[in-house]
Amino acid sequence: MAYTVIENRRGLLALKEPGLPPPTLGEVCRLEQSESQAGFVLWVYDQFQRGSPVETVCRRIAGYY
């Protein structure tokens, strides 16, 4: 299933740059990881901007509410 998701993303990225070769699977994985990490940082920033206590944010990150 993960392979299918990565290949789908790879195809979408190839359509954005038709003159270039499609990205490798490794490049797509690194891009996804980078975007995921950036999204996490933005979520933490947003939580603190909304005034969430540090303990609450840490509990949510750890996976228990």
Image (cartoon, rainbow, N blue to C red):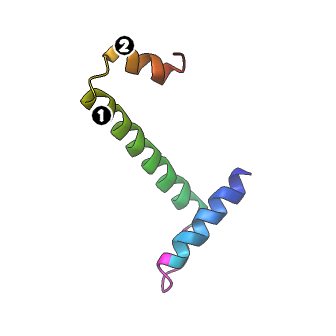
Q: Earlier in the sequence, mark 2 or mark 1?
A: 1
Residue 48 percent location from the top left of the image: 28, 27
User: As drawn, is 2 to the left or to the right of 60?
Assistant: right
User: As drawn, is 14 to the left or to the right of 7?
Assistant: left
Q: Which residue is mark 1?
A: 45
* Range shown magenta: 16-23
Q: Which residue is mark 2?
A: 55
Element class at badge 2: helix
**Residue at 46% from the left image edge and 24% from the top image edge:** 61
Predominant SS of the magenta segment: loop
Question: Outermost residue toward the front?
Answer: 50
Callout 2 crowding tier (Cα within 10 Å): few <14, some 14–19, many ≥20: few
**Residue at 34% from the left image edge and 40% from the top image edge:** 42
Amino acid on which the number 1 mark rests in the picture: Tyr
Between residues 20 and 59, which one lies in front from this camera angle?
59
Amino acid on which the number 2 mark rests in the picture: Glu
Callout 1 crowding tier (Cα within 10 Å): few <14, some 14–19, many ≥20: few
Q: Mark number for residue 17?
A: none
Establish if 26 lies above or below 17: above
